[in-house]
Amino acid sequence: MLSIRIKNLSLEKCLPYVLVLAGLVGFLASFVLTYDKIQILQNTNYDPSCNINPILSCGSVMKTEQASLFGVPNTIFGLVGYSMLITFGVLLAGGAKVKRWVWLGAQAAATIGVIFMHYLFFQGVFRINAICPWCFTVWMATIPIFWYITLYNVGEKNLKVPQYMQKIAILARRYHGEILVTWYMVILAILLQHFWYYWSTLI
């Protein structure tokens, strides 16, 4: 089954490993992007290895204003954020107990991250008309981080859920894997539909 049932493996036990794995994926992708960004700044003719075709292209995305926030490349935020996440996950895996305010801080960071991820996805698809493969990898790592931190915080009552949403919260925990896969499928469907004019030429 797609979902790991909570009754068989609690979120408390699997969450640290989800955070470490997703953090490693995000950090490695951010590292490669940072390297390519430095190379582009040094040599405008540099061709990143992830320039695969007109749609899947890092170089064209890196040169846009959306690639930076407050003048700082997004990749730097990724390096810092994912390194902190890996550390947090390792501490949890080692049995560390953290206070509620730490979990709320993690929730705030994960929420900002997933909102920013969808903003960049929208910009890439509908404004830049190109998707950076490494950026896409980072985005896909961000979703489970937000999803499972949220489910954990709801389950541990770090986040207060109104009474009328209790049943929804229970269903979300029960079918967390199916919901995550559906989330990914919606994103892939958008990419398939929007860039079909190009994908169709490859068939």
Image: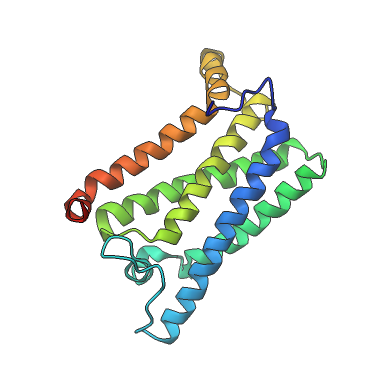
- Res 145 seen here: yes
Picture coordinates of residue 41 (x, y %)?
Answer: 43, 82
Q: Is residue 187 left or right of residue 146?
A: left
Q: At 53% from the left edge and 14% from the top edge, which residue is drawn?
A: 167
Q: At 82% from the left edge and 45% from the top edge, which residue is drawn?
A: 94
Q: At 52% from the left edge and 49% from the top edge, which residue is drawn?
A: 141
Q: Which quadrant of the figure has residue 145?
A: top right
Picture coordinates of residue 70 (x, y %)?
Answer: 46, 66
Q: At 48% from the left edge and 63% from the top edge, which residue is drawn?
A: 74
Q: Is residue 141 depicted above or below 69 in this figure?
A: above
Quarter of the image for the N terminus: give it.
top right
Q: Which quadrant of the figure has residue 95?
A: top right
Q: Viewer-proximal residue, 162 or 122? A: 122
**Residue farthest along the front direction in this orientation:** 203
Q: Viewer-proximal residue, 198 or 120? A: 198
- Res 77 seen here: no
Q: Is residue 6 depicted above or below 107 in this figure?
A: above
Q: Is residue 117 depicted above or below 167 in this figure?
A: below
**Total numbered labels:** 0
Picture coordinates of residue 12 (x, y %)?
Answer: 72, 32
Q: Is residue 98 left or right of residue 11?
A: right
Say how the picture is coloured.
rainbow
Picture coordinates of residue 26 (x, y %)?
Answer: 55, 56
Q: Is residue 200 left or right of residue 153?
A: left
